[in-house]
Amino acid sequence: SELKKIIQGIPKAELHLHIEGSFEPELMFEIAKRNKITLAYDSIASLKEAYKFNNLQEFLDLYYIGAQVLIHEQDFYDLTWAYLTKIHSQNVVHVEVFFDPQTHTDRGIAFDVVIKGIYKALEKAKAELNISYQLIMSYLRHLSEEEAFKTLESSLPFKDWIDGVGLDSSEMGNPPSKFTKVFEASANQGYKLVAHAGEEGPVDYIWEALDHLKVVRIDHGNRCLDDDTLVQRLIEQEIPLTLCPLSNVELKVIQKMEEHPVLKMLDKGLLATIHSDDPAYFGGYMNENYYETAKALNLNKEHLMQLAVNAFEASWLNSETKEKHI
Ligand code: HPA
Ligand code: ZN
């Protein structure tokens, strides 16, 4: 369709992507087989059948199970490379990738095994696909701050490969303020800071991410529209929101795409952007997220261009490189 062509034609930046959430069932079965791991699902179809979520936690439970088949550096490399070739086909030219070290180190996989596989694929994509990238290490918020400190410590030998830290996993009951000290320590190591906030959690969590963690970007942030003072703050400080429309529908953050807040956010002057979050689980990569949102909210070409420009604006590219994309 015309709309699909327009979206394909726009060079895009993806800023909210969990690499473990790009694990397609086909690749998961292939890696499980070579690692001699038996999945609890006997076929790709029955696994896909389980991808029906009522909330964030139901998704996370499956996402952590899927990640258990990743053992060797090659597995992390293959996972990352599959994602990068996919987004290359969708005209995504810059990506800021999250990875969850604790999902792997807690199962006895060494930090270096995880990061080397991911890093080598990213470097190959930079050289061969002309995709620029940043890498963001996320702390799991259902674990303790002490555990996050251990992860920070493990990351230090690879500091040059890591651009920032994030905060993900179960939001309710795990407010950003739980991680104030480890975010401060991360900033002292030179890491940039982001956090998931206001996806399922209340508007207070967005305030905490700003005031306690000092993040430069909010992941999701859907709930900010509940608070006009917060909206003003986000506008004035040009704090970007990395929204994930298909994720929001699949996790019942909204009941249907027509309710997605992104258009309201753009109209208010917020630096709203669109991304895929966990594309293998939520039924779409970047183009599908743009397309489903555009269809449901009647977005025009200018809106779509604005969303793409906003993402480069919100990215961690240097200002000279940003200019080239905008
Ligand atoms: N929210 C919180 N944690 C996550 C997500 C998400 O959408 N995806 C992967 N980890
Ligand atoms: Zn996310």
Image (cartoon, rainbow, N blue to C red):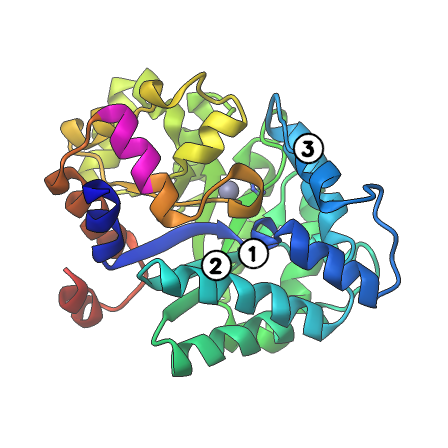
Q: Which residue is mark 3?
A: 49
Tell me: 196 left or right of 72. left
Amino acid found under the numbered disc labelled 3:
Glu
Pinpoint residue 186: horizontal percent, then vertical percent: 53, 59
Query: Does the magenta portion include 292?
Result: yes
Looking at the image, residue 256 sits to the left or right of residue 59; the answer is: left
| Separation (CA) of disc 2 from disc 3 | 27 Å
> Which quarter of the rendering shows the C terminus?
bottom left
Q: In what element is the residue under mark 2?
A: strand
Image point 83% across, 43% down: which residue?
Answer: 42
Residue that mark 1 sits on = 19
Q: Earlier in the sequence, mark 2 or mark 3?
A: 3
Instruction: Say which mark, if any, is on residue 236.
Output: none
Q: Residues within 10 Å of mark 3 (few under 14, many from 20)?
A: few
- Which residues are the magenta region? 290-297
The question of residue 46 being in magenta is answered with: no
For the view shown, which residue lies furthest in the bottom direction?
127
What residue do we see at 66% from left, 29% from top?
57
* Residue depicted at x 18% and y 64%: 325
Q: Residue at x 22, y 24 (%)?
A: 264
Residue 204 visible in the picture: yes
Q: Which residue is mark 2?
A: 97
Q: The disc labelled 2 sits on which kind of residue?
A: Val
Q: Callout 2: 10 Å neighbours few (<14), some, many (20+)? A: many
Q: Residues within 10 Å of mark 1 (few under 14, many from 20)?
A: many
